[in-house]
Amino acid sequence: MHRAASAAEAAAHLWGCRVVDAEFMYRPRPVHGPTRAVFDGALHSRLSALSAEDGVLWMADSPATLDSLLPLMRAFPHLRQAAALVNPVRWSGDAGDTPHRFCWSDASTWVRLATTDRWARIDFALAVGAALGACWLAMPAHDAVWGRGLLEALMRFALRHARGSMAAAVSPYAPQPHGLMDGAGIPRDVVDVLNAAFERDSLLRWRIWRDQVQGFWGKMALMPCVQCDLVRTHANQTTLEDDLQIDRVLREQGFQARAWWAADTRLYRQVLPVFDRAGVRTVIERTLHYSLNVPGAGVGGSMLNAPRDRWLRWRSHLSPRFARACHEADGLIAECSAEIAERLQTHGASWVDWGAFRHVVRVGDPSVEVWRRDGL
């Protein structure tokens, strides 16, 4: 594994790769237990799906995180691997007094940052991709589980949907977005509630085929590296929902962004390290905040608050298990929505913690404020 000081140096080490898997590592590898089992299982699946022609770009928050990943890196010596420390920089203008106005604890210790940590790593990955040119850039989330043959299937789909000589940027979408992992101990009913929360449209497969949905998703995306520079140049990197922003730029620049229905869960699925009601609630709370910057949408603008269509309502009448999952999911969504609505009424904004960062979102404002306690 080569430790690079810049995107150019990382690109030089990865030159000639067919696919570069950009891994976003915001904290050290979990130490033990079910959380490690999920993390290791998902990451191992992605590395196993790569060939000797491929490479890995590790972007981490700290040397400790990179050191914790060394056993997994060494398990794949045939892959070319480059690593870099990538974090958001401080906000350069007037940071404002948000921590004091919103009465956060230790208000004077909070530092405002220019972007989310995810945007900082996306920007670095795009810079590496732009320098490589003739290859593919994959950007998976931690919960993306790949099967052997996934990348090849996505490439074929991307070429089928090329515009002129330019292949499409593509993302897989699993019929049941969240799944299980052997040995991780994730309760089946927890996965049922997660899926019930996000399952709102029984015609989604048809809409994906018709290209009537977002095509580039942050859970997993594969894009031709020749698109990276334009995306990096034109994307608004102050937004929270980075995948929607990238999808917009790709389409505005004349590229194709297409979703691929991943019917075979052996090829692709998502497995979150969520083991109880509190974990499901955290996922829902974060998702609800994505919609707040949509003008006029408010809390009700999230996909989670969209009513299920009649076929899913009919299914809930036939399946007590699905009905229980829907009831639990809707209760959690209502709880989180009420808390967000109260914050909006009191402060004119809401915020959600993600890793070491706090994200402040306002209705109709496309930009998110990112804060972190100094020294953390």
Image (spheres, rainbow, N blue to C red):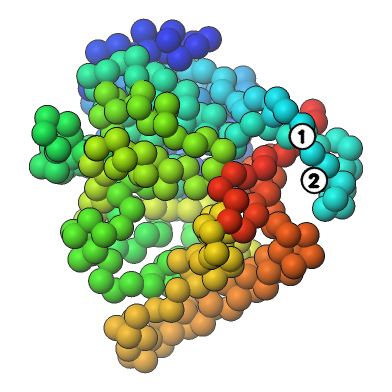
Nearer-the-camera pick, 154 or 101: 101
The residue that mark 1 highlights is 95
Q: Residue at x 73, y 34 (%)?
A: 112
The reply to whether residue 67 is in sight is no
Q: Residues within 10 Å of mark 1 (few under 14, many from 20)?
A: some
Q: Position of residue 70 (x, y in %)?
A: 50, 22
Task: Let me know if residue 316 appears in the view.
Answer: yes
Vertical arrangement, residue 38 with respect to residue 326, above or below: above
Q: Residue at x 42, y 26 (%)?
A: 233
Near-viewer residue (304 or 52):
304
Name the image quarter holding residue 188: bottom left
Is residue 211 rendered to the left or right of residue 341? Answer: left
> Could you tell me which residue is drawn at 18 percent across and 34 percent down?
167
Q: Can you give x and y, in whole percent of width and height, for residue 304 in the image? A: 48, 68
Task: Give the residue pinned by disc 2.
Answer: 98
As measured in the structure, the alpha-carbon distance from the residue carrying label 2 to the one carrying label 1 is: 8 Å
